[in-house]
Image (spheres, rainbow, N blue to C red):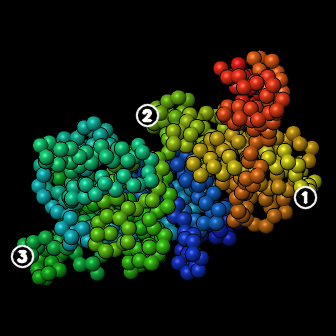
Amino acid sequence: MYDHRSVEARWQAVWQQTQIYETDLARAIDRASPEPRPFYNLMMFPYPSAEGLHVGNVYAFTGADIYARFMAMNGRDVFEPMGFDAFGIHSENFAIKKGIHPQQLTARNVERFRETQLKRIGNRFCWNHEVQTTSPAYYKWTQWIFLQLFKAGLAERKKASVNWCPSCKTVLADEQVIAGKCERCSAIAIQRELEQWFFKITRYAQRLLDNLEHLDWSERVKTAQRNWIGRSEHDGTVQYHLRDWLISRQRYWGPPIPIIYCQTCGTVPVPEDQLPVELPQTQDWLPKGTGNSPLADIPEFVNTTCPSCGGAARRETDVSDNFLDSAWYFLRYPSSNCSDVPFDPQITATWLPVDMYIGGAEHSVLHLLYSRFITMVLHDLGYIPFEEPFRCFRAHGLLTKDGAKMSKSKGNVVNPDQYIEEYGADTLRTYLMFLGPYDQGGDFSDRGIAGIRRFLNRVWQLAMKHQDSIQSNELDVESQRGLHQTIHKVREDIQALKYNTAIATLMSYLNTLEAKEQLSQAEIKSYVLMLAPFAPHITEELWSRLGESYSIHQQPFPQANPEFLTQAQVTISVQINGRTRTTFQLAPDASQEEAITLAKQSESLQRYINEQEVRRVVYVPGRVLNLVI
């Protein structure tokens, strides 16, 4: 039997020790190869605001990781970073619920997410470039971005009627109000007249709309953005549904907005060399509901000097929305080790835009629209050479449990930890991908996961059975055809993110291999290589046991030989008026036209047809052609 616990622990330790997934980002710049090899694989970093990752996170991360592993086996330098979106209302509300300071709780949650969950799911994470939005080394640059928008006239403070959540005790952006309710806590949002900071995203409305035409994104996400931007024309006047992005929050847990108010000089930006404006320590961090942030009650933070005239001044006490933190994090990952710039120009030009971004469709407007806006602004200000952040975006589906949507209130949220412990990460990964089409999701059941466990066990037993008796001789034509058609199908399906059908093909081919007395090296090694992106630990172990060098994840993915992709020809009977007159060889999927052409060329049929008109044709592909004359 395959012992997943020892195998997975061993290879996770080896991967960490050998730093196999740590990408040398500078090396890609120095390469002499004319073909660009970098492949930036991004997944939505989680909020460390609950007890831990749920199975939906693992579903999203696994699907993204399989694609990256496949690209690495096709010769690309894959960069797959991970971090934590740790500021904001989600984390703060969880801290309120637990009665623990958000700084302590966030640090504890991040540790748990990383060490006990993310490092166990089998992803090829590049941990040397981890980012945390709550680190002053990160939010220094979030504040820097705010200043660039302020200097460009794209950030302004104005009095406006805004959405107020009486439960979260803060304002909300329009995008954070769903059907009149706060998207975080579902309290009914009310209108309040307040002075707030806005980003002028409306100036970019038409460009955000136009660029959707040529983006390689899931159509439902593009549709959601089109609808939200909402261009309409009345009597020649162009209007948009989109409103400016309200980014200030009257909460504690966020980056302070880097603005100073001076009675003499007015609104003054904090000089860049004084960043970060650090979030002050306080035990009085609960939201007040007064329209002011708790920072307003910390005199040593509020009272400062004006950077322009040196006179007495006060700091802005609102913090920025955590959607600003996540609107640029993908730019920071490759340059996370740089302390003097937010993103190194050369590294950024080499590795971005992101090659593949996979995430939930529920982020269609908030996160994805804001990221596009910030990227466009940074491009227009000359900081980056591209104006769209993500070359390719794919929305994954949602999981249900026993037919019902997973929710904490229903108590049916699946914790992945127990399944990793009982069945192993490889089984959980493969099972999640087998549930249904990746872009649609599926229904999680304990019975189904046990079936995948049996499948991986059969793969293990097959390899162990033939371990010492693998043939190195040439395969017969039929075996070659079976192998190469499997390679072709699995390769095509992974490229199209059709993981469930790729796994089904591997299951079917396993039946073929199990029925054989002897296996060749090509059959068993190709099989393990094809399974590797889905089940990285068991395949690493089998590769080693088959006498191959470390690591399977640095081997080329098998290539199909085109000469074995055409199906074998079959014998079909040719009838005239229902009576068989001859037979000939034909491809099983040959068209009716091809069959008739071949039949008319047959000398033995000429005397039966004798230049008479064929009135009707009955054709059953692969079996019979009947000409009625």
The spot of residue 455 in percent (x, y) is 75, 41
Residue that numbered label 3 is attached to = 264
Estimate the spatial distance between the alpha carbons at disc 1 and disc 3, rounded to whole Å: 85 Å
Q: Nearer the viewer, mark 1 or mark 2?
A: 1
Q: Nearer the viewer, mark 1 or mark 3?
A: 1
Estimate the spatial distance between the alpha carbons at disc 1 and disc 2, rounded to whole Å: 58 Å
Rendered-image quadrant of the C terminus: top right
The foreground one among 570 and 522 is: 570
Label 3 crowding class (10 Å Cα cut-off): few <14, some 14-19, many 20+?
Answer: few
The foreground one among 572 and 387 is: 572
Helix, strand or loop under label 3: loop
Helix, strand or loop under label 1: loop
The amino acid sitting under disc 1 is: Ser
Helix, strand or loop under label 2: loop
Chain-order first, disc 1 or disc 2: 2
Among all residues in the image, which is located at the extreme left? 264
Among all residues in the image, which is located at the extreme front? 611
Label 1 crowding class (10 Å Cα cut-off): few <14, some 14-19, many 20+?
Answer: few
Residue that numbered label 1 is attached to = 472
Q: Looking at the image, is 192 positioned above or below residue 113? A: above
The amino acid sitting under disc 2 is: Ser
The amino acid sitting under disc 3 is: Thr
Q: Are marks 1 and 2 in contact (CB under 8 Å)?
A: no
